[in-house]
Image: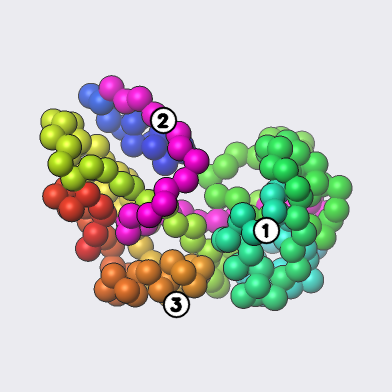
Amino acid sequence: MRTVGQVIAGTPELSTEVGLSRDLPATATALLHGAVDAVLSAEHPLAHRPEARPADLRDSILWCPAALDRLDFLREFAGQFGIAAEEGGANLGLDHLIGRLRGQPRRFTLLPAEIPLPDGAGICSVPLCDPTPLYTWSLIWRSQDQHPLLGVLLQRFAEIGNRQRWLEYDPARDWLPRHDYAELSRLGYPPNDCPAFDQTAGELRA
């Protein structure tokens, strides 16, 4: 929704109705992504660093707001970097998550970098680097859709995506879950290649 919101705000000629769905059986090949921050208690040893590496978190505990078998990204991140993880049961929203982090100084979680944290919450965010975890998103549309503003919408996604580095991936500085990396390789995307949209194909592609 944050991604879509930026596109809609910059495209006033569009009259947009947003609908939600639970999941997609087959994900399109495009990626829209942004940087991820580690969110930790203000008492965490890394809390006031300007940045942190995933390797720095090996003595910490990754707090997962739902069962790990439903959170592939967090499960793979913890496994690859040797970080212990705890499950939180039900995902009860940001306030509940903040309370869980604040109460246990060794805990942290991963959130998109642009999510604002409430003042005085007792937690802080630290950018992750070397590598930066990237969370993959998909943009899918019906290739036979002839709506006159579809091209405008797709172009705006591509413009904002390129400007904010949503469409880049560099294995020397970024981290993707194994499945996403394998899918990029299968589709022939070389490192640092920025996919552009092809309206006839119904997907973002190089």
Q: Quadrant of residue 110?
A: bottom right
Q: Is residue 95 on the magenta stretch?
A: no
Mark on residue 19?
Answer: 2
Q: Is residue 72 visible?
A: yes
Q: Nearer the viewer, mark 1 or mark 3?
A: 1
Q: Observer-nearest residue: 24 or 186?
A: 24
Residue beneath the point at 72% across and 60% down? 62
Q: Quadrant of residue 56?
A: bottom right
Residue beneath the point at 42% across and 71% down? 181
Q: Is residue 176 above or below residue 100?
A: below
Colour scheme of the picture: rainbow
Q: Secondary structure at mark 1?
A: helix
Q: Position of residue 201 (x, y in %)?
A: 18, 53
Amino acid type at image mark 3: Ala
Residue at numbered disc 1: 68
Q: Earlier in the sequence, mark 3 or mark 2?
A: 2
Amino acid type at image mark 1: Leu
From the viewer's perspective, is 66 left or right of 106? Answer: left
Q: Earlier in the sequence, mark 2 or mark 1?
A: 2
Circle 2 packing at 10 Å, graded few (<14), some (14-19), many (20+), is few
Q: Quadrant of residue 9?
A: top left
Q: Secondary structure at mark 3?
A: loop
Mark on residue 172?
Answer: 3
Residue beneath the point at 64% across and 59% down? 69
Q: Which residues are magenta?
A: 15-44
Q: Is residue 20 on the magenta stretch?
A: yes
Amino acid type at image mark 2: Gly
Q: Is residue 123 visible?
A: no
Q: Position of residue 73 (x, y in %)?
A: 57, 61
